[in-house]
Amino acid sequence: MKTEEKDNYTILRDEKEDVNDFAEFLTEIQDRFKDKNIVTDITKYGELTLEELLMFLKLSITHRKGKKSFVIVNDTINIDLVPEEIHVVPTLQEAEDLIGLEELERDLGF
């Protein structure tokens, strides 16, 4: 896994070729990133099924309960099919923008 630190979030990218293994790996090590906003860049996998995306559901819910953002970057999934518990955006810029908005909401007590 590759990590890239930004001002208020960390980007995680898989170095292997299996999105399911990556989701399981992130779930196993989620305590390592519990105090950070996370952007999971899975654009390299291309088109994903909803089932593959749902592998990140538990991780997303757990991370967001800790008052931190968890955003997935993938531009092939139909956003209308994605449950609201998972934030999926098509670009890294949109992920950064979403984290900024969520931090602002948390600061305001929402």
Image (cartoon, rainbow, N blue to C red):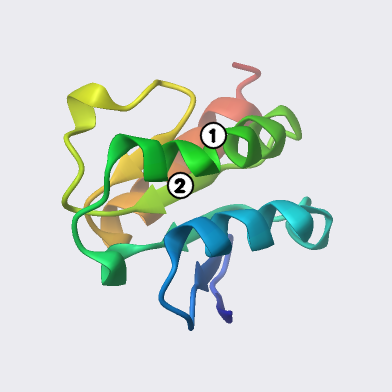
Q: Quadrant of residue 44?
A: bottom left
Answer left or right for 109 relative to 16.
right
Percent position (x, y) of residue 70?
Answer: 54, 45
Q: Quadrant of residue 82?
A: top left
**Residue at x 54% of width, y 26% of height:** 105
Residue, disc 1: 57
Percent position (x, y) of residue 7?
Answer: 57, 69
**Residue at x 26% of width, y 50% of height:** 48
Position of 3 relative to 58 (above/below) = below
Rendered-image quadrant of the C terminus: top right
Position of 62 relative to 17 (above/below) = above
Marks 2/1: CA–CA distance = 11 Å
In the image, 20 versus 88, the foreground residue is 20
Tag 2, which secondary structure?
strand
Residue, disc 2: 71
**Residue at x 77% of width, y 56% of height:** 28
In the image, 20 versus 106, the foreground residue is 20
In the image, 39 versus 47, the foreground residue is 47
Answer left or right for 19 relative to 2.
left
**Residue at x 60% of width, y 23% of height:** 108
* Tag 2 and tag 1, C-beta contact below 8 Å: no
